Image (cartoon, rainbow, N blue to C red):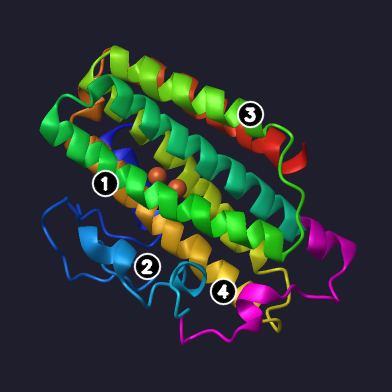
Amino acid sequence: MSRQTIRGFHQRVGRSMTVQRRGIASAAPSASGHTSSPEHSATANLPSSAYLSPSGNPDFPEAATTGTPADLTRAQRRIIERIIRVDQAGELGANWIYRGQLAVLGRNKSLAELIQHMWDQEKKHIQTFDKVILQHGVRPTALYPFWKLAGWSLGAGTALMGREAAMACTEAVETVIGEHYNDQLTALSKVPHDHPSIPLLAKILAEFRDDELEHLDTAVENDSQKAPAHALLSAIIAGGCRVAIAASERI
Ligand SMILES: [Fe+2]
Ligand SMILES: [Fe+2]
């Protein structure tokens, strides 16, 4: 993806192309209202803290994390189920991508820190969706083992091709995931928001989308586009992600 295309993507999702680099604690709010500093995963007021903080999130009532809407149409229920099923699967895959990258590149201290930071955010994402999927009684994807293997293989395989290829993998994956979270926000707008779990889900999708876009920025700033056969590699990885997403929504 060219730099111009990336800028266009960020503009479409309403986020500036200002790179939120690690170690530069930016105070600029993102689309979800949180800062992109490395400490943000510990910020109590992020929507995901409703699930991950022992004290919850005062912005949401208890029912937001314990209940599910009872009066949805079949089509609305299907929207919720597809969103949650594929996101839990995708976040699992993302965790295994970074695990694979770190297994190969972990001896490079600065690079390992960079990858570990992104992995830590993916851990937050999967921990959240592990709770959301139980809350809403959604069946997990049957492709769960596939996501682990595919994620690790993709992460380790591109890392073996070099640092730039590992970053190109991150760039391609996070571009698709960022777009996907945006599409889900559009789909979720068709579901009534009167049960508090639905506005919370929407805010979590936006929070995680912003994290993924931070990862995309990090990859580009760390030479993803200098990877050998960058365009081909990106197209293959992005295409694979889109196929896996479509399958995991249904299977
Ligand atoms: Fe993620
Ligand atoms: Fe990510």
**126 w.r.t. 251: above or below:** below
Where does the image place residue 243, in percent across and percent down from the top left?
63, 29
Q: Mark 2 highlights which residue? A: 31
Q: Mark 1 highlights which residue? A: 117
**57 w.r.t. 77: above or below:** below
Q: Earlier in the sequence, mark 2 or mark 1?
A: 2
Q: Earlier in the sequence, mark 3 or mark 4?
A: 3
User: Given this view, does label 2 or label 1 mark the residue nearer the observer?
Assistant: 1
Res 238 seen here: yes
Circles 4 and 1, Cβ within 8 Å, touching? The answer is: no
For badge 1, the amino acid type reads His
Q: Quadrant of residue 90?
A: top right
Q: CA distance from mark 4 to mark 1?
A: 25 Å
Q: Establish whether ligand 2 lies closer than 8 Å to the Cβ of label 2.
A: no
Q: Secondary structure at mark 4?
A: helix
Q: Mark 3 highlights which residue? A: 145
Q: Tag count in the figure?
A: 4
Q: Mark 4 highlights which residue? A: 200
Residue for point 38% across, 58% down: 210
User: What stretch of residues is rendered in magenta?
Assistant: 57-78
Q: Secondary structure at mark 1?
A: helix
Q: Earlier in the sequence, mark 3 or mark 2?
A: 2
Instruction: Between residue 127 and residue 181, name the one nearer to us.
Output: 127
Label 2 CA crowd tier, 10 Å (few <14, some 14–19, many 20+):
some
For the C terminus, the image quarter is: top right
Label 1 CA crowd tier, 10 Å (few <14, some 14–19, many 20+):
some
Circles 4 and 2, Cβ within 8 Å, touching? The answer is: no
Where does the image place residue 159, in percent across and percent down from the top left?
30, 19
Q: Earlier in the sequence, mark 4 or mark 2?
A: 2
Residue for point 68% across, 48% down: 85
